[in-house]
């Protein structure tokens, strides 16, 4: 990919775009534009994180293994953040599975390069501290959400969070995927998706979701959606 394409793509990650121009230019050679495909697994629990990813229009889900062949989404990282925040906190081994939930591009940086950046105590360091806090809010809110809120409300919240990050009304989503994300059986997912369709909030066919009525979706989603969004907005 040409340098201009890389520069343009880099700007669509909001954390990188929030850096002062000079800092941005300095970091550019240390960032590599990569394509992520739907369903790719970047890391499994226990893997050494070799690169951190700043998604542009892609989405990376952080999944926790709760039982054999059973997972639950604990966090979602899109253009508002960076996947691999544990590297920033001094831990190189992944605790989660990193699964590409939305295909697209990301800027990746070698973990060791990011570690060197900490010594600068520059703008990136400060931004990542604030982002860590925002991601912590998202993860703790999701823990409560998974325990207390209905599948319909959780599915709506998750689709809204995906919609915000991916930037298109239509995105890929299989029932198996939704079932792994929400930690519920396929029948439960199919019932909840059917309910959203009946209300004409989404259309869903052949693994493709289209958001038809965003406001309606916001009414169905649990309040966790707003709590998480506010913490992201405070990043600037
Ligand atoms: Zn909730």
Image (cartoon, helix red, strand yellow):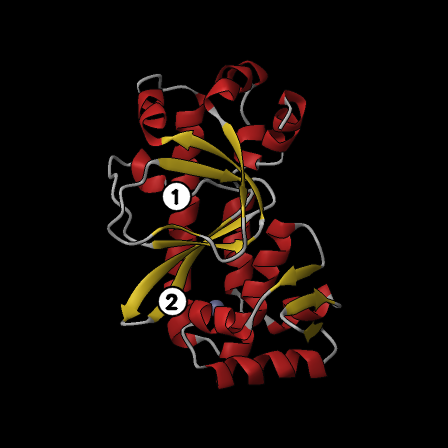
Q: Which residue is mark 2?
A: 72
Q: Residue furthest front?
A: 1
- The reply to whether dot 1 and dot 2 touch (C-beta < 8 Å) is no
Task: Tell me which corner region of the image, top left, top right, bottom left or bottom right, holds residue 211.
Answer: bottom right
Residue pictured at 28% horizontal, 36% vertical: 89
- Separation (CA) of disc 1 from disc 2: 21 Å
Q: Is mark 1 within 8 Å of ligand 1?
A: no
Residue pictured at 60% horizontal, 78% vertical: 193
Q: Closest to the observer: 220 or 119?
A: 119
Q: Which residue is mark 1?
A: 133
Callout 1 environment at 10 Å: few (<14), some (14 to 19), or many (20+)? some
Give the vertical position of 166 relative to 217 (above or below): above
- State the image coordinates of residue 117 (x, y, percent, origin top left): 36, 21
Give the vertical position of 172 relative to 182 (above or below): above
- State the image coordinates of residue 152 (x, y, percent, origin top left): 55, 78
Give the vertical position of 150 relative to 78 (above or below): below
């Amino acid at each position: 990919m040409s340098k201009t394409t890389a520069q343009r793509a880099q700007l669509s990650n909001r954390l990188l775009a929030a850096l002062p121009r000079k800092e941005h230019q300095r970091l550019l050679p240390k960032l590599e534009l990569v394509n992520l495909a739907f369903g790719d697994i970047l890391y499994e629990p226990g893997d050494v994180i070799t690169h951190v990813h700043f998604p542009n229009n892609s989405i990376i889900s952080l999944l926790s293994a709760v039982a054999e062949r059973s997972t639950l989404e604990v966090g979602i990282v899109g253009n508002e953040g960076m996947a691999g925040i544990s590297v920033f906190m001094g831990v190189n081994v992944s605790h989660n599975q990193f699964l590409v939930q939305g295909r697209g591009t990301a800027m990746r940086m070698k973990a060791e390069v990011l570690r060197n950046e900490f010594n600068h105590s520059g703008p990136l360091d400060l931004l990542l501290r604030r982002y860590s806090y925002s991601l912590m809010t998202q993860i703790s809110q999701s823990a409560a959400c998974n325990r207390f809120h209905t599948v319909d409300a959780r599915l709506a919240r998750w689709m809204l969070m995906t919609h915000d990050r991916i930037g298109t009304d239509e995105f890929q989503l299989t029932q198996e995927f939704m079932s792994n994300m929400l930690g519920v059986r396929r029948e439960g997912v199919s019932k909840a998706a059917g309910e959203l369709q009946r209300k004409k909030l989404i259309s869903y066919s052949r693994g493709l979701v289209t958001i038809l009525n965003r406001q309606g979706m916001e009414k169905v989603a649990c309040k966790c959606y707003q709590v998480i969004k506010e913490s992201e907005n405070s990043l600037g």
